[in-house]
Each structure stands twice: as structure tokens, then as C-alpha cells.
Image (cartoon, rainbow, N blue to C red):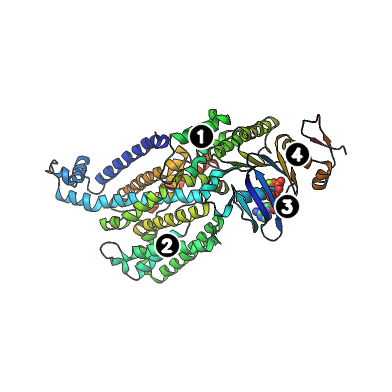
Amino acid sequence: MKSIVGINKLSFKYDKADILKHISLDVEQGSFLSILGPNGSGKTTLLKNVCNLLKPHNGSILIDEKDIEKIKYKELAQIIAVVHQGTDVQFDFSVFDVVMMGRFPYLKRFQSEGKEDVEIVENAMKSTSIWELREKSINEISGGERQRVLIARALTQQPKVLLLDEPISHLDIKYQIEILDLCKRLNKEQNITVITTLHDINMASRYSDYILLLEEGRIREMDTPEKVLTEKNIEDVYGIKVDLIKRNDNERPIIIPKNM
Amino acid sequence: MNLYRKMYRTKIFILLLLLLFFILFSITLGDVKIPFTDTVKIILNKFGFLSSKIDMGGIKKSNIFIVLNIRLPRILLACLVGSMLSLVGTSYQAIFKNPMADPFVMGVSSGAAFGATIGILLHFNKGIIGFGLTSILAFGGALLTTFIVYNLARVGSKISTTSILLAGIVMSSLLSSGISLMMIFNHDELAKIISWTLGSFNGANWTQIVVILIPAVVGTLFLTTFARELNAIVMGEEQAQNLGVNVERTKKVILITASFLAACAVSVSGIIGFVGLIVPHLFRLILGSDHRILLPVSVVGGAIFLVICDTLARTILNGIEIPVGIITSICGGPFFLYLLKRNGRKKLI
Ligand SMILES: Nc1ncnc2c1ncn2[C@@H]1O[C@H](COP(=O)(O)OP(=O)(O)OP(=O)(O)O)[C@@H](O)[C@H]1O
Ligand SMILES: [Mg+2]
């Protein structure tokens, strides 16, 4: 399998202390990877390194087998699309215009949005079921709808990799399933590599091909959900005792915290 | 098919018609009233290929002179300055993500005023070919101050919004104190300095237009090509970068171009406040935050606004001219407060 994101001995610090320490990993093209870890373990920081918002102070990152430092901004945006955490700005754009922004990396300075761009936007909006919202203002829709708008915008970038930072943390259970189902579908149907941070271990278990468990900026383990989600790993990393439950052999494990 | 162009073209076209109307109407007003038809004839007559077809009989020579050499240059200069200030306001507000940012935050105004004051005190006012050395000093002062503020606010290769606003305010107070000091020691020139700091198009001439036309047009066209970048940036700088915008470079380029335009504007008109706040806000409320429409509309809208204000400035009191900066503040201030009140914090950007 081809590696789409390769991280090699990456260390990162904001000021003094290292936040990420010696991270090395490869993400296969077309896989679904969840990043788990307690608050402050460095999940967001790792994502921001992968999308070039932060620069590692040691080590290197390869995107599509190219050094990230050598990729131009627009070119990178054609490979990686990012859905940021809870964006709340005072602006007034229509949903359609927000999704159209995803075409930015493909448009030259003096070129305007054409028929093809409109089609791509329409398809992205239909596959995220927000086409009906196209004329609404981005301020007048619910949190779950807004999350789907941002995913639709990411899709119009026609990326190979979709990065999401806690895409479901403010959503109710229905929207949580809806968003993750959508990611899984894009992953399966369009072979888009999905890398997402999550807090919900059971959701990660249910949707991911691989789980990366971070502990204080180090990789505790990166493997399939069955291998990573063990009572010991969870107790060591999160400091809580859990029971692992599997209803049958084909199913992914679920965790339930032990009674007090 | 071009979706956006089509949607926007009518709006801009209507505004352009409005602008044309206000320009012509404004020419008819003043101490000497000139009939509308005569005004149109005098102007059309200037287009060589039309002059044979137009009957200029019955139009006074003095009226022709007033239209072509006094009112028209003044009104066109007001258009140019209004466009620039308003476009600069729109751009600053977007890159600072601060609805209160206006063309003067970068210290442009205080720098220009400082330069102009020095010019006035050194009696540079005589001017060569109509474009006074005072203007050149004002322009230099504006650019120099912008440069200092920019470098004070720069941390490494990044520009911090908060520091730039703070640095702008501090530089402004510093330079204002300098101006006050010079005023205390030079009572004779007090009136001139004050009138300069309040802004006026009195004495506008074709030379001024010729001098700023090219930078104004080039700068304006250049800035309007950044509409998509600005849209992405107001959504958040990290998002913008992930959409492929080189945020730091874009901010720098826009900051420098916009400050240059503001310096051009100030150097021919003095300090005219509020244009860069009112016009962008008004259109943002009506049309939303999309800079693909907001930028061109600010250009035309700024021109309309300043033509109206300047017309009031020169006609509202018989025989006495009010500095246009006072008019823009009188119209602008309350209007601005009204907008602020009505919309609370919502939709300001
Ligand atoms: N801009 C910053 N400057 C300095 N330190 C930071 C900054 N952002 C994060 N940190 C620190 O880096 C560490 C990792 O933060 P990060 O946001 O990556 O954690 P996270 O795993 O995403 O946490 P959460 O689950 O709460 O989102 C934390 O200790 C945090 O305090
Ligand atoms: Mg985080």
C-alpha cells in the first residue's frame, strides 16, 4: 500500500517543552485513521503539523511522497483538506459561497468560478445533503449542518486526505453518526484518506481502520482498533479502568468504564 | 456562463449610473447655478468626435470655465479619493478582521498631517505645477509612518493584528503631539494647518488628478483581484491557509498596497474621516460579506458618498466653504452609531 502521509521522527515544541516527541508513522492511502488521547496529549498539534500550519522543529513530513516544505500552498490544498474545530466568526456568507471557497486552490488569480466549479460544488453539497441550505446564511444553520458545510467545502478541494479535528464533539448522537457515516462513505467510495481526532473511543473503534493512541506527545500504539483498545492501554493512558465488550467475534470492541 | 459576474454586474451598473447622475447634478450646483442641459453639453463637447454635433450657442464662456476648470476636476478628485478611502477601508477591515479598522489605523493620517504641517511651516505651499510640495511631504509622511508602524508590529515574518492597531494608535498620538507643538510655535499658519487636518477639495485641479490617477487605478484594480483571498481570510487565517491562501504574504501585499492608496488620497485631500468606515459597512449590511462584490461596490459607493459630501461642503452655506471632513463626520458619525446599535455585534464583518 502507498503511504500518503509519512511522518519521520517528528518533534515539535511551541516554546520550551516538546509537545510532540519522536513521532514516526505512515498512513496508507485510503485508510481511516483516528487519533485518540487525553486532553493536551497533542492531537491537534499533530494535525496542524500535517497540514503545515505548524512547522516541526525536528524530523520531516512527506505528503504524497513529497517533502511538505517543498509543496506550494495551493498544491497542498489540492491534496489535503482540513475541517477545523468549531469555527465561529462574524461574517455573512451564503452556504453556497462557503462551499465554493474550496475551489480556491484550483483557480488562477484572474480566473473566475466556472461551470465546472459550480458542478463540483453542487455534487459535494448533494453528497453531504446540504443542497437545500445553499441560499441560507452560514450563521443561520445548526452546528451539525455547519459541520457538513465545512466537509462539503473540503470535498470541493478534491483532496486525497481529509483531516478533521474533533468533528463530532458538539453534536448530538444522530449527527455524530451522520458525520462519521459520511466520512466513512467518502473514504470507501472516493478512496479519500480520513485522519480524524476523536474523543469518543467507541466511535473510533467502530469507524476506524487504524487507531493512533497518543500519550503526552508520544505514540503509545498505532494499530487496528482490536490491538490498540486494550484494558491496559486505556488504563495507562487515561487512568481509568474499563471493561472491554465484544458482542461477537466480527465486531469491534466497545469500552465501558468500570463501576466506581 | 459566469454565475457571479452576472449576479454582480447589474448592481455595479446601477451604482455607476447613480454616480454619473450625482457628478452631473453636483456640477450644476454652486454659487453660480448652471442648467443641467448646459452642463451635459459642455462636457460632451469635450469629446472631439461629438463637438461638431453639439450646439454650444447660448452657453456663457464663464460657465464653461467653471464647469471644466473648477467643478469637474474638484468632483472627479472627490470621486477618486472617495473610492480609494472606501476600498482601503474594506481591505483593512478584512485583513484585520476588525470592523473598526479604517484607512487611518496604520498611522497614515497622522503621518500625512505631520508631513503637511512641516510643508506649510517651510512655506512650501506655493506648489510646482499645481501639485504642492506640501502634498508630497504629506505623502512621504504617510508612507514613512506606515512603514514604521508595520515594522513595529511585525514579529518575525508575521504581522499581529493587535500590535498593528496599538502601534498605529501610539504613533498617531505621538505625531499629533508633534503637530500641536508646531502649531503653538507658529500661530500665523494655524488656520492653514487646521484646514489641512480637516480635509478639503478646495483648490482641486487637473494636475492633482493626473498625478494620482495612475497609482489610484492600478492600485484599485490590483486590490480587487484579492477578493477570494479576503473571503477566505475573514473565515479564519488557519482555514484560509488550508484552502491554499498564503496568508502572511497576502496580508503584507494588501497592507502595503492599501496604505499606498490611502497615502495618495490623503496627500491631495487632507484627512477625511469616516469614508472608509461608513461605505464598507453600509454595503456589507445590504450585500453580505462577499468581497467579490464588496470590493467593486465599495469603489463606486465611496465615490458617490464623497461627491455628495463635498457638494454639501461647498453649497450648504452661502459663500462659505465647510471642510469636507467635517461633513463626512457629521453624516458619518451618527449613521455609524445607528448601524452599530441596530446590528449589535452581528454581521459587522
Ligand atoms: N498555541 C499554543 N502555545 C503553547 N502551547 C500550546 C499551544 N497550543 C497547545 N499548546 C499545548 O500543547 C499541548 C498539546 O495541545 P493540543 O491542543 O495538541 O492537545 P489536544 O490533544 O488536541 O487536546 P484536546 O483533546 O483538549 O483538544 C497542550 O499541553 C497545550 O497546552
Ligand atoms: Mg485538540
Q: Amino acid at mark 1?
A: Val
Q: Are marks 1 and 2 on the same chain?
A: no
In space, the residues marked 1 and 4 are separated at their CA atoms by: 34 Å
Q: Are marks 2 and 4 on the same chain?
A: no
Q: Is mark 4 within 8 Å of ligand 1?
A: no
Q: Amino acid at mark 4?
A: Pro
Residue for point 47% across, 41% down: B290
Name the residue that disc number 2 marks. B143
Tag 2–tag 4 contact (CB < 8 Å): no
User: Foreground: B260 or A240?
Assistant: A240
Does residue B77 show up? yes
Which tag is nearer the camera, tag 3 or tag 2? Answer: 3
Q: Amino acid at mark 3?
A: Gly
Name the residue that disc number 4 marks. A225
Query: Which dot marks residue B211?
Result: none
Which tag is nearer the camera, tag 1 or tag 4? Answer: 4
User: Foreground: B347 or B225?
Assistant: B225
Counting from the top left corner in percent of width and height, residue A164 is at 64, 41
Quarter of the image with the N terminus of chain A is: top right
In space, the residues marked 3 and 1 are separated at their CA atoms by: 37 Å
Residue for point 63% across, 51% down: A49
Please give the chain letter of the residue carrying mark 1.
Answer: A
Q: Amino acid at mark 2?
A: Leu
Query: Which dot marks residue A121?
Result: 1
In space, the residues marked 3 and 2 are separated at their CA atoms by: 47 Å
Counting from the top left corner in percent of width and height, residue B279 is at 42, 45
In space, the residues marked 3 and 4 are separated at their CA atoms by: 20 Å
Name the residue that disc number 3 marks. A217
Asked whether, in this view, residue B178 is left or right of residue A41, the answer is: left
Q: Indicate the secondary structure of the residue bearing disc 4.
A: helix
Tag 3–tag 2 contact (CB < 8 Å): no
